[in-house]
Amino acid sequence: MSTKSLKLLEDMRAAATFILDATTGLSLAEYRSNQTLRFAVERNFEIIGEAVNRLSKLDPDVAAQIPDQRRIVAFRNLLIHAYDVIDDVQVWDVITGSLPAFQQQVEALLHEND
């Protein structure tokens, strides 16, 4: 795997780790009430989506190992381009539902290349 591909995976891991660490132990209501946290989480989801998008162009075989890559990029696009209609419940569902599995997959890809 190229150095650039590894860097993109590292960016994904760092962003996912930040989101999970920052929201662990919080409720949806606590998340919704903290604008700074919401903005930081949204920014890190943008980083994840952009890194997945770049990886899909740079190294499609590696990117193909990330489930739901098109949905991840679409979520990033929503956060960036439709910022005025962001649904905190939808973001929270991604945090609590699919982000942990995404983080594990990225970790596995990185460990394959140690």
Image: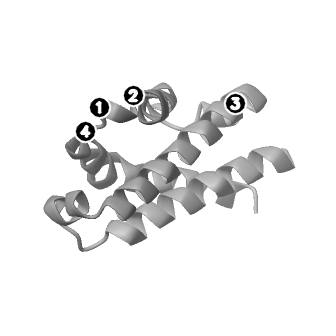
| Mark found first going from the N terminus, 2 or 4 | 2
Amino acid under disc 4: Asp
Pointer 3 residue: 61
| Residue 100 shown left or right of residue 26 in the figure | right
Circle 1 SS class: helix
Amino acid under disc 3: Asp
Specify the quadrant that holds the N terminus. Answer: top right
Give me the C-alpha separation between circle 2 and circle 4.
Answer: 10 Å
Amino acid under disc 2: Ala
Circle 4 SS class: loop
Q: Are marks 1 and 3 in contact (CB under 8 Å)?
A: no
Q: Are marks 1 and 2 in contact (CB under 8 Å)?
A: yes
Pointer 4 residue: 87
Q: Position of residue 23 (x, y in %)?
A: 32, 67
Give me the C-alpha separation between circle 1 and circle 2.
Answer: 6 Å
Pointer 2 residue: 82
